[in-house]
Amino acid sequence: MSSTQMLKGILDGCLLAIIKDNEVYGYELAEKLENYGFDSFSEGTIYPLLMRMQKEKLVSSTLKKSTAGPKRKYYSLTEKGEIELSHFLERWHTLQANVNRVISHESKSIHKGVELDER
């Protein structure tokens, strides 16, 4: 499974977290994700998600003048979006803890098996 496939389920939460504190436009979101190490997401991936999130009333948008061309659509979190982000963070922490327990336990089992085989 590629990292892109693994991340698709959590990309919404990452976008909500980025948008939470500041209004952000689509290209800026792609740049921020890249700065965090997510180089596999383009604007073409992000814009459909933003449109869906807007339909679900998780984000709102405002057109603002740009110094470099046409107006830009800036996204901000709605109250519903803040609640969804909070729920996402709860689910993420639970998932992260569960995955870490599995990996830690299985890693110990693998190392014990290697030690036994070497004796």
Image (cartoon, helix red, strand yellow):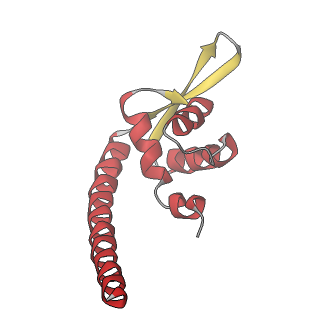
The residue sitting at 36% across, 86% down in the picture is 118
Q: Is residue 114 above or below residue 27?
A: below
**Residue 87 at x, y percent in the picture:** 30, 55
Residue at image x 50%, y 52%? 11
Q: Residue furthest right?
A: 69
- Locate residue 6 relative to residue 100 in the image: left or right: right
Q: Which residue is at 34% across, 72% downward?
A: 103
For the point 26% across and 64% down, which residue is it? 97
The answer to whether residue 58 is visible is no
Camera sees residue 109: yes
Q: Nearer the viewer, residue 82 or 30?
A: 30
With respect to residue 119, does 6 lie above or below?
above
Q: Position of residue 90 (x, y in %)?
A: 26, 57
In the rendered structure, the answer to whether residue 71 lies left or right of residue 89 reads right
Q: Quadrant of the C terminus?
A: bottom left
Identify the image quadrant of the N terminus.
bottom right
In the image, residue 97 sits, relative to residue 75, either above or below, namely below
**Rendered position, 25 above or below 102:** above
Please identify the quarter of the rendering in which residue 21 is found: top left
Res 116 quadrant in image: bottom left
